[in-house]
Structures are given as structure tokens and as C-alpha cells.
Amino acid sequence: MGEDSLPRRPQTDEIAAPQMTALRFGTADIQDQMRPWLDEITRDPRAFRGQWRALHLLDLTLTDTKVRALLGQRLDAGIAAPLEIEPGGPGAQDKAAAEDLAEQLSALEIDRITRELLHAIWYGYAIAECIWEIEGQRVRLADLRIRHPSVLTWDPLTRAPLLVTRARPAGQPLPPAKFVLLTNPRAHGGQPFGPGAGAWCFWPVWLKRHTYSDWAVALERFGTPIAVAKTRRNAPPQEIDAALETLAAIAAGTSINLPEGVEIDILESSRRSGGDFNIFCRDMDRMIADVIVGQHGTAEIGQHVGTGEVHMKVLERLVTADARRCAAALRRSIATWLTTWNFPGAAVPRLTRDTAPPEDLEARARRDLLVAQASGRRPTSAYIEQVYGGEWEETPGPAPETGQNDARLAAGSPPADAITALVDQLTGETIATQAAAATLLPVQAALDEARSLEDLRTRLTQLADQPPAAALAGLYAHADFAAMLAGTAGAPVRPDSDPEA
């Protein structure tokens, strides 16, 4: 609705209360209510009658436990993030309009209202009536009341929404700046709204309920052993009646008196009952989950971690789309109307819900480290505080020597900082020489002390069975730490410190 068609002051009367709009769903009642205006119009009223019947069926389908759980999961996710209101522009009036809208919405149960409005996911559309109040020169939103979808019908020619009341069952145009309408995306412009999830869930729920009924009968018939009484071929009716009474007593679990000549056997089913029913009902539940949350992985137990993560991303995309459509509908309606009335000329505030999952900061830190090592750059303090939060300060360290930096620059090497100096200190001695000494000295001692070839063989065998010398193990740990530190800092390792040299 443009600002030119917006009234100077809103309509404050409540016009879509349940007592004004409630229509009974019985066929005869609907025909009686439609009869006063059948002579006034030429269009076929069966479209409206079919719409009301469909809404009634959708209400009944919504009582399914699986539907209720999955739809509740999607609705709750849609309001999990708080509603954020930002100014539509940099001006003072723009900021004042955003603050006023935030103050008015905070006075309402905006999360509850948004959750009810998101039932457009199920019906295909949802409608809410604005209850306005005038406070001097200021317009205030006193309440935003969600109405049942049956208060709306659609003009078959223009596809414009019409308000259905007891006085006007044919429908009347919606008054301006009075109703918030949220509709599902359409497949094409000829539709007033896109079909809701209920349209796709009706048949799975209907089939599942009938299957449960048949399943209960099958469990009663085949799941419980059947007692069989055997009587004589030509037994008199009194004997047969006595046998049937005995079977009834067995079924009731009471004590029995077995008549003479009557045998009781227990007949059990030759196959386990319920397997096919169980599979069918499970498939129906999966169809319902695919429609409502876009997949069935998050609605079942036993999914692999990788598959569960992929399925969760599908649900997250649906929730993000729901939040965006709902925020856009509120911005086009109450945000625009209140801004026009209370702050003429100001930009309309922006409404958002950040439903995206929190970022994995550990993965972000690993990525930043790899980028820093590959590019030789490091993040700024502003970037660190923005991404990771908290308060940061520079790590104190010794100042670099100017002469040493000049020499390195002349040789084409990076300047020496505290970490580079530490790496030089750690790798200053020749690791290869120390490694050779730590390895060969015990062998030389064995050669000097051996009294015969047999004694030398024994000493060398003992050396081979012993663990590496502590000095050698510490030396290689020292070299590994120096190499790791040099790689992280981007400092060069001296060639003579290579342990494989």
C-alpha cells in the first residue's frame, strides 16, 4: 500500500473479532449463509465453499502428533533469534522512527505474535488485525491479533483478499492500514498465495490414521493368542454354550471350569503381526517431515553425523526464508504505517531476525592462521576484536636490533623480531653434529672396552635393545620445536641446523 492511499488516521474499531467472522463448516450452514448474496453475483460459489471445507480439513490434520511436533520445531526456530530493528537511514528522524517502532513492538508479545503469524507455512497464508490507538498526535499499536484464515476469501477475478463476516459472507475489501497479511510464495501470478504444507500433509495423515485403525484390529486379532475349544462332533447346544463360556472366562482372565469332553488349545499366529503396518506409518511420517522441515533426518534417531549436519542445513535455510518473509511483511505494513503517521518523511526501519547458526570460531581461527602463514600478513586488532570479541593488547617483547635488521634487509631476509631471534638462538648450534655425537659415543665406548669379538657383539646387542639416549631424544625434540616455531613465525631456519644434513 502506497503512502498516497494511506488514511491520515487509522481505523480503531475491531472488525474481525471471532464473534463477527466465525462461520460454521457444515455444508447446509455454509449454503444458508451464502444464499443472501447468491442472487447478487454470478460467480460460482463452490470455490468459496471448497475453501472453507479445505480449511476445516487442515485444522483436523493439524491435530496429528507428528505434524504438530515438526511444525512446532520449525515455528520455534523462526523466533529463536530476537527481532532486530535498525534505522532505515542515517538521519535523526530515521533513528527516532526505529526507536519508536522498537518501543511499540517490545510492549507486545512480538515473538508469540510472530509464531502465530508463521502459521502461513501450514495454511498458505495468515492474517493479523491491527488494533490502533490514538495518543494525541501519535498513533500507537495496542495489539496485533492473529485471525483464523477463514476470515479471508479471494476475489476469483482480481485475486484480491476479501474479509468474510457474518454480515458480508461474500466478502468485502480489506480496509487500508488495518490487516497484516503473510502469504507463501506463489508459483505464478495467477495464484493469490502459495499452497501451505497442510495441503501436502493431508493425505499422509489420512492414510496413517486409517492404517493405525487397521493395525489395532490386526494386533487384537493376531497379536494375542486365540483360545480354541474342541467339542464332540454332535455335541448338544448346551455343551457348545458351556465351551464358549469357558473361552470367555479365559479371555477375561478369571478362573474356569472345563466341562467334561471339552479340550482347550491356544492358537497363535504363524507370523509376527504389525511389520508392514509399521513400515507404512513410518513412510507416511517421513513424507510429512519432508514437507514441513524439508527432510526427515532431524526427525529420526540414528542418523550419521555427516548426514544429520546436511539435513540440519536444509532446515536452517527454510527457517531463514520464513524469518525473512515475516520480517518483510511486518516492514511493509506496521513499520511503514507507523513511520508515515508518526514520522513523516523518515525512512522505514529495517526488521531482521538473524537465524543463522553461530560461527565456529575454532575453524575460523585455524583458517586465519593458515592465511597468515601463506600470505605473511597478520590480522589487525580491530578484526580480532570484531570476530573473536573480548579485549586484546600487544604482547610485550624485546625491541629488534636495528643493525641486524639492516643486514637482513640487505641480504633479502625478513627483519628479525623477537620470535626470529629466538629461532636463531635455538638453531645456532649444529644439530647434525650433536646428533652424531650422541649416537656414536656409546658405540666408540663399546669398541674401546670390548675384550673380544664375542664381548663386542654382546655390547652392541645391548646398545641396540636400549631406548634412545635421553640427550638424543631431547635434541630432536629441541629441533622439532624450533622448526615448528620458525614455520609459524615465518622465520627462516638456518641450513646448518637441518637434522638430516
Image: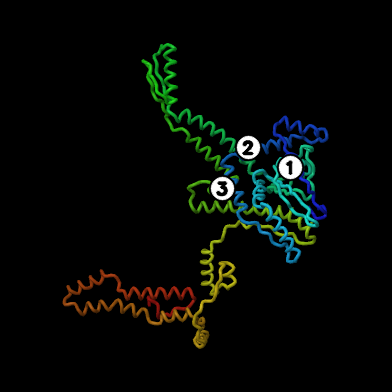
Where does label 3 land, which residue?
295
Where does label 1 land, which residue?
17
Q: Is residue 101 visible?
A: yes
- Name the residue type under label 2: Leu
Q: Could you tell whether 214 is left or right of 32 in the image?
A: left
- Mark with earlier residue (1, 2): 1
Q: Is residue 372 above or below residue 61?
A: below
- Name the residue type under label 3: Gln
Nearer the observer, 430 or 279 = 279
Nearer the observer, 481 or 153 = 153
Question: In the image, which is nearer the foreground, mark 2 or mark 3?
Answer: 2
Where does label 2 land, which residue?
60
Q: Within 10 angstroms of label 2, few (less than 14), some, or many (20 or more) residues?
A: few
- Mark with earlier residue (1, 3): 1
Residue 314: x and y, percent?
58, 52
Q: Could you tell whether 456 is left or right of 113 in the image?
A: left
Circles 2 and 3 in contact, beta carbons < 8 Å: no
Residue 350: x and y, percent?
70, 59
Secondary structure state at the residue bearing disc 2? helix
Circles 1 and 2 in contact, beta carbons < 8 Å: no
- Mark with earlier residue (2, 3): 2
Q: Within 10 angstroms of label 1, few (less than 14), some, or many (20 or more) residues?
A: some
Give the alpha-carbon distance from disc 1 to disc 3, as whole Å. Answer: 37 Å
User: Looking at the figure, which quarter contains the C terminus?
Assistant: bottom left
